[in-house]
Amino acid sequence: MSIEYGEAQLLPGEKIAITTDTATEPFWKKAKERKLTACRCASCGHFRMPPTPYCPECQSREMSWPDLPGTATVFSFAICTRSPYSGEPLIYVPVVVDLDGAPGARLVSNLIGIKAEDVEIGMKVTVDWNPIQDDWLLPIFRPV
Ligand SMILES: [Zn+2]
């Protein structure tokens, strides 16, 4: 017997705030242009997410931020049934996705546009954008 949760909901953007630092700001600035990127070592090419000041492979501080295609594959997910803000009933689906064009880079996000009970590991998804506090855009995903 499978549970029917219903449509995965968007988290309320007005409740979501981010902070940036020198290592993460390029990601958020590209997101504001609706471009998905990931931190790539400009010295050895290793992708790392979340961005960190030093490459874990070669210790270089040089970073590049290539435009990615915006597609990804669901690596893992959860189905949540309560709002993290109010505790009221809310169906939403946190996901960890493998980013296309950035081998080894994963992003924690949310999935919408699908019934929660239909989400599967390995499914192809594409980026969309959720407006959040301070005019930032949060990358979220929906099925291709
Ligand atoms: Zn490196």
Image (cartoon, rainbow, N blue to C red):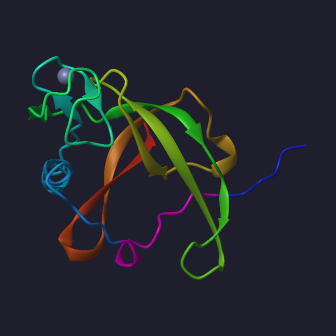
- Residue at the far right: name it: 1
For this view, does 106 lie left or right of residue 88? left
Assign the N terminus to one quadrant of the image.
Answer: top right
Q: Position of residue 41 (x, y in %)?
A: 17, 27
Ligand 1, by image quadrant, is top left
Q: Position of residue 30 (x, y in %)?
A: 14, 49
Q: 18 or 100: which is nearer to us?
A: 18
Q: Is residue 12 magenta?
A: yes
- Residue at the far top: name it: 44
Our reading of the magenta stretch's main secondary structure is loop
Q: Is residue 20 magenta?
A: no
- The residue at the point 27 percent across, 21 percent down is 57
For this view, does 128 lie left or right of residue 2? left
- The residue at the point 65 percent across, 80 percent down is 88
For this view, does 29 lie left or right of residue 48? left
Residue 143 in the image: above or below residue 10: above
Q: Which residues are magenta?
A: 7-16
- The residue at the point 13 percent across, 31 percent down is 66
For this view, does 96 lie left or right of residue 16? right
In the picture, residue 118 is in which quadrant? top right
- The residue at the point 58 percent across, 37 percent down is 76
Q: 62 or 112: which is nearer to us?
A: 62
Q: Position of residue 77 (x, y in %)?
A: 59, 43
Q: Position of residue 84 (x, y in %)?
A: 57, 72
In the picture, residue 126 is in which quadrant? top left
Assign the C terminus to one quadrant of the image.
Answer: top left
Count of number-bearing discs? 0
